[in-house]
Amino acid sequence: MTAKEALDRIAILSEILVDVSKFHIMPNDGINEIRNLDIAEIYFLLREQIKELEELKRYPTADEVCEALSEWIKKNVEEALSSVRYDEKSFYYFNEYDYEENIVQKTFDENIAFGIHDLPPRLITLIGRFYEGLEAGE
């Protein structure tokens, strides 16, 4: 789920919650029967969406990036012999010749350089979010 999808769900649930609370205050005119919604259920769903949104806001850890990269490397890079590791400046793995292959590394001017040029967008985004978190001090 994307942040936009989570926000959209929160907005919809909030509107329903407001509508339902109005209907419960108003005299019974049949609307409650049409809606047939439980305020506690809506509140629970709203809280769940907020939790999901908070999770989306969180920066990924080095371990999470290593795990995601490792899964992709195992499926797409034949010569990879190890899981992906992180050493404070780069994400890397060892190839069949026991040579360290950098996937991403921080350069001397604090930019990042990709050693593998065909990563899928979701991994590029994950790596970018990780480095954003480092810059933000998290």
Image: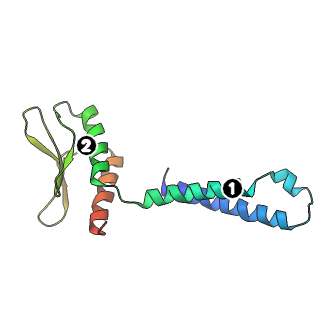
Residue type at the position of mark 2: Asp
Q: Position of residue 58 (x, y in %)?
A: 40, 60
Q: Position of residue 24 (x, y in %)?
A: 83, 63
> CA separation, marks 2 and 1?
43 Å
Number of other residues with Cα within 10 Å of mark 2, as a class: few under 14, some 14 to 19, many 20 or more: few
Point 25% across, 43% down: residue: 118
Point 80% across, 66% down: residue: 22
Q: Is residue 18 left or right of residue 117?
A: right
Identify residue for label 1: 42
Residue 118: give its label: 2
Q: Quadrant of residue 9?
A: bottom right
Q: Is residue 17 visible?
A: yes
Q: Are dots 2 and 1 in contact, CB under 8 Å?
A: no
Residue 12: give its label: none
| Protein image colouring | rainbow
Instruction: Name the N-terminal-most of marks 2 and 1.
Output: 1
Name the foreground residue: 119 vs 127. Answer: 127
Q: Is residue 25 left or right of residue 61?
A: right
